[in-house]
Image: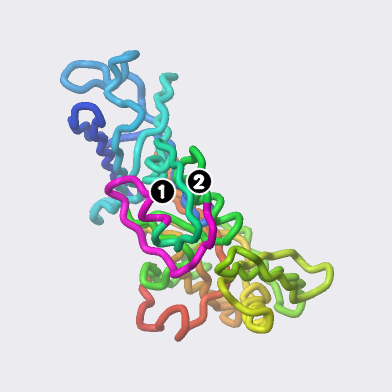
């Protein structure tokens, strides 16, 4: 059995003092581009001490809301790898102790913004609302008239997702806004079903059996909209947003993009080991010894990581198919 190794580093927001723990009962991390906030729950024994003093004693707890926290994990003797970097959002004093944590999106909920624009670009808006110290990368998009009244940056991002379909997520301290998948961030892993997968809920679909109706919306510079629908009557409803496209341009793009949802391949998720850290936006080159005709590459939409007394596992949720030569190069492949 592989030996598990962990390192939890907590930096006090008040004093700057650092507490390091190399043990834990359980760590659970949830990460997906479908939510701005990655979450982490850590369970640790209550009767642990530092310098002869209990770590948690009522109001004198060493762990407080707003403290910085970093979690590094691996199978020994591999090098520790950062699986979570964020802030403590809540501390449960029950036995055992539980620390509830959020990634840098925690900072986006601490202040409110009031602004009004006759017309604004996405990049200008993010420059105005992001807290000091947060860097971002964003697509070029004009949002038109925009008004903010006593709302948090996170609420603004939720509105951008709802109205403009602008996705967003943090990766290595940088906030990416506009796309679900950022190619330069994608790593490509070879995963073999018979060797690397512990459990799965994967189901196979044929493209001709997939019925999709896509509502395409083009946001115009004056904040008006053009809406069309393409696809199958009675099909699964999807919505996609675009910017400054005429009706004919919008129809052409929508008919091209609907193919992304009508692929032949797997849908669902699978469980694998913690050999290497997998992140959403990475690409899984899924292979099978028994059924090589089902080999294919898929983007990762989400990850659930569990580490502790029951082992080190990652639950991987698959997204759309990835195309070699377009989404990734065969030279990028690395074994898991």
Give the percent coordinates (x, y) of residue 262.
68, 76
Q: What stretch of residues is rendered in magenta?
A: 125-146
Disc 2 residue crowd, few under 14, some 14–19, many 20+, Cα 10 Å: some
Circle 2 sits in a helix, a strand or a loop, which is it? strand
Queried whether the magenta region covers residue 127, the answer comes back as yes
Q: Is residue 294 visible?
A: yes
Quarter that holds the C terminus = bottom left
Which residue is more in the foreground, 31 or 119? 119
Q: CA distance from mark 1 to mark 2?
A: 44 Å
Q: Quadrant of residue 63?
A: top left
Q: Which residue is mark 1?
A: 312
Q: How is the image coloured?
A: rainbow
Secondary structure under tag 1 reads strand
Q: Identify the residue shown where x is 44% and y is 68%.
A: 139
Q: Position of residue 255 (x, y in %)?
A: 68, 81
Q: Is residue 206 left or right of residue 185?
A: right
| Disc 2: which residue | 148
Residue 94: in magenta span: no
Residue 263 seen in the figure: no
Q: Quadrant of residue 69?
A: top left
| Nearer the camera: disc 1 or disc 2 | 2
């Amino acid at each position: 059995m592989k030996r598990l190794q962990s390192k939890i580093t907590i930096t006090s927001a008040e004093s700057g003092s650092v507490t390091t723990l190399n043990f834990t009962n359980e760590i659970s991390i949830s990460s997906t581009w479908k939510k701005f906030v990655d979450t982490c729950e850590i369970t640790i024994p209550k009767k642990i001490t530092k310098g002869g003093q209990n770590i948690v004693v009522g109001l004198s707890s060493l762990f407080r809301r707003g403290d910085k926290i970093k979690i590094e994990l691996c199978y020994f003797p591999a090098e520790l790898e950062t699986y979570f970097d964020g802030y403590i959002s809540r501390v449960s004093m029950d036995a055992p102790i539980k620390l509830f944590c959020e990634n840098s999106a925690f900072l986006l909920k601490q202040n409110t913004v009031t602004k009004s624009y006759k017309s604004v670009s996405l990049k200008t808006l993010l420059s105005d609302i992001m807290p000091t110290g947060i860097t971002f990368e964003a697509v070029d998009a004009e949002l038109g008239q925009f008004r903010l009244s006593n709302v948090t940056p996170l609420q603004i991002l939720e509105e951008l997702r709802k109205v403009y379909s602008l996705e967003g997520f943090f990766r290595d301290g940088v906030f990416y806004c506009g796309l679900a998948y950022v190619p330069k961030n994608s790593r490509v892993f070879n995963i073999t079903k018979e060797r690397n997968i512990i459990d799965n809920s994967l189901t196979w679909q044929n493209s001709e059996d997939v019925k999709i109706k896509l509502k395409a919306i083009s946001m115009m510079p004056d904040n008006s909209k053009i809406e069309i629908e393409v696809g199958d009557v009675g099909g699964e409803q999807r919505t996609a947003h675009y910017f400054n496209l005429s009706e004919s341009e919008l129809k052409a793009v929508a008919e091209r993009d609907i193919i992304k949802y009508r692929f032949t391949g797997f849908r669902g998720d699978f469980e694998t080991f913690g050999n290497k850290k997998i992140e959403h936006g990475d690409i899984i080159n899924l292979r099978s010894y028994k059924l090589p005709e089902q080999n294919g590459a898929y983007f990762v939409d989400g990850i659930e990581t569990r580490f502790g007394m029951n082992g080190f596992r990652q639950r991987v949720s698959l997204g759309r198919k990835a195309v070699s030569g377009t989404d990734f190069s065969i030279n990028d492949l690395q074994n898991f």
